[in-house]
Amino acid sequence: MLCRVGQIRRCAASLNQSINQIAASRQKHTLPDLAYDYGALEPHVSAEIMQLHHSKHHATYVNNLNVTEEKYQEALAKGDVTAQVSLQPALKFNGGGHINHTIFWTNLSPNGGGEPQGELMEAIKRDFGSFQKMKEKMSTATVAVQGSGWGWLGYEKDSGRLRIAACANQDPLQGTTGLIPLLGIDVWEHAYYLQYKNVRPDYVKAIWNIINWENVNERLQMAKK
């Protein structure tokens, strides 16, 4: 019996060591590079905003996500369910911040604006009546976000339809609504206040001039697979 207990303890110790090794070897999240310079989106979004938004705010989400995941791995290894539960809000906030911003940067382009083409345009006309109606509906939902959050154009897998949604804070669209994110507009004040002050509608109106519709269309194609 003592021999059996000793084997169980050795197995448990070995399992914990394996978990710790996996945690130690886990590749950390990194801040993605932008495909354009900080000043490339001017005059619609200033270089100062882009520099602060990307190198400070997004970087903070990445750093905090890595720290939180390390703590979570430690809690898993210890079987500390209370600690695991207490870390969930930080995982959601910082993980969502990283996910959302990674999408956001690719949704923007100095060569953006205008109207989408092809299958994306057809889907927009089918689900909203026209491109202009989609813009108006998404702009209204985005401007109406209370406090901080995001406006989204998403793809609903079950119905094959495009949907508009708003998420509070850094809540990730897919993780909270099930919609696959295609296009996001960040309405945290750090995304626009230095340039647009508290006039959020002007910022939302301006950002349509730099939307990368090719990226949005690529995301639609991936979502449909």
Image (cartoon, rainbow, N blue to C red):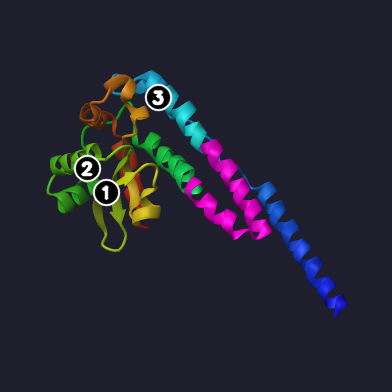
Q: Amino acid at mark 3?
A: Met
Query: With respect to residue 205, does 141 lie above or below?
Result: below
Q: Would residue 178 be counted in the magenta stretch?
A: no
User: Which residue carries the number 1 mark?
Assistant: 165
Disc 2, disc 1: CB below 8 Å? yes
Q: Which residues are magenta?
A: 62-90
Q: CA distance from mark 2 to mark 3?
A: 23 Å
Which residue in the rendered view is the most extreme toward the right? 3
User: Which residue carries the number 2 mark?
Assistant: 141
Number of residues whose C-alpha sits closer than 10 Å to that of mark 2, classed few (under 14), some (14–19) or many (20 or more): some
Q: Residue at x 24, y 52 (%)?
A: 163
> Residue 3 appears at what percent x and percent y?
87, 76
* Marked residue nearer the N-terminal end (3 or 1): 3
* Marked residue nearer the N-terminal end (2 or 3): 3
> Residue 180 appears at what percent x and percent y?
35, 52
Q: Residue at x 30, y 50 (%)?
A: 154
Between circles 2 and 3, the one closer to the viewer is 2
Looking at the figure, which quarter contains the C terminus? bottom left
Circle 2 — which element?
A: helix
> Residue 179 appears at what percent x and percent y?
33, 54
Say whether residue 178 is left or right of residue 139.
Answer: right
Q: Amino acid at mark 1?
A: Ala
Q: Is residue 91 visible?
A: yes
